[in-house]
Image (tube, helix red, strand yellow):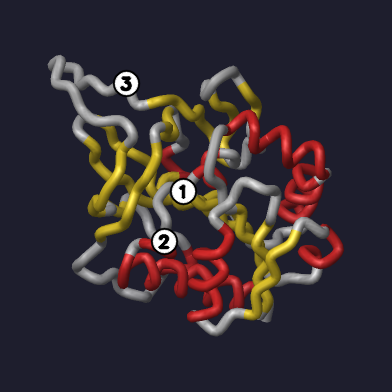
Amino acid sequence: MKIGVIDYGMGNLFSVEQALKRLDCDVVVSSDVQQLAKTDGLILPGVGAFPDAMKRLAETGLDRFIQEQVKAKKPLLGICLGMQLLFEESDEVTPTKGFGFFKGKIVRFSGETANGEQYRVPHMGWNTLDFQSIPKWLEGKGLPENRFVYFVHSFYGTNTEPQQLVATADYFDVKVPGVVQAGNVCGMQFHPEKSGDFGVFLLRQWLQGVGVSTC
């Protein structure tokens, strides 16, 4: 199985690549669409601002490539900012359209609860995932009791489609979409490659799902 990590200049590529290699994946880190097209599944990482990321993807033609690959039913996993780019739009810096694979809008944490309690932004640290549904790649696997994952983000998804919501994490009075799934597209707001045993478990199960879908 070969996994392509999309390099558009705004991803934490090394940690993702090393995590995949530890799971015995053949990994291609590239911006070359011909190389990426030969893979069994794609990962879109991301660190930085939403509009900058969409601009770079458009400038390189990778936005069209991603749309084509998803339409062709190739599995795609977005991580952190990479997940946010898969939503309809974001108000980070300036209103910007995303890919629209997931319903909803990306907004900034307000930093204040409905009761006036102040909280820190960015959301940084370990949180438990609460599962609302089980995607095909997790069916029959049995979830570990310890479901902590590591988040680092100031923006999150709102107005999500219930059918697309897999798992959430509580951050004060906000239910943060942690895992979303729509067809062959998956998103993880946290960093699975930095989330200890449970992060590795989720990444491994997603990869096995890719292997099943390409057999």
Nearer to me, 169 or 193: 193
Question: Could you tell me residue 157's position as x and y percent?
Answer: 44, 34
Q: Earlier in the sequence, mark 3 or mark 1?
A: 3
The residue pinned by badge 2 equals 192
Query: Please, what secondary structure does the residue beneath circle 2 have?
Result: helix
Left or right side of 180 for 151: left
Name the residue at 71% across, 53% down: 70
Query: Please, what secondary structure does the residue beneath circle 3 have?
Result: loop
CB of mark 2 within 8 Å of CB of mark 1?
Answer: no
Nearer to me, 113 or 208: 113
For residue 159, which quarter of the picture? top left
Q: Is residue 184 visible?
A: no
Question: Could you tell me residue 161's position as x and y percent?
Answer: 46, 36
Cα separation between marks 2 and 3: 25 Å
**Mark 2: amino acid:** Pro
**Mark 3: amino acid:** Ser
- Residue 151 is tagged as none
**Mark 1: amino acid:** Val
The residue pinned by badge 3 equals 110
Q: Quadrant of the N terminus?
A: bottom right
Q: Earlier in the sequence, mark 2 or mark 3?
A: 3
Q: Earlier in the sequence, mark 2 or mark 1?
A: 1
Cα separation between marks 3 and 1: 22 Å
The residue pinned by badge 1 equals 180
Left or right side of 44 for 150: left
Name the residue at 53% across, 44% down: 47
Query: Please, what secondary structure does the residue beneath circle 1 have?
Result: strand
Q: Residues within 10 Å of mark 2 (few under 14, many from 20)?
A: many
Left or right side of 198 for 183: right
Name the residue at 36% across, 75% down: 141
Name the residue at 61% across, 59% down: 43
Q: Quadrant of the C terminus?
A: bottom right
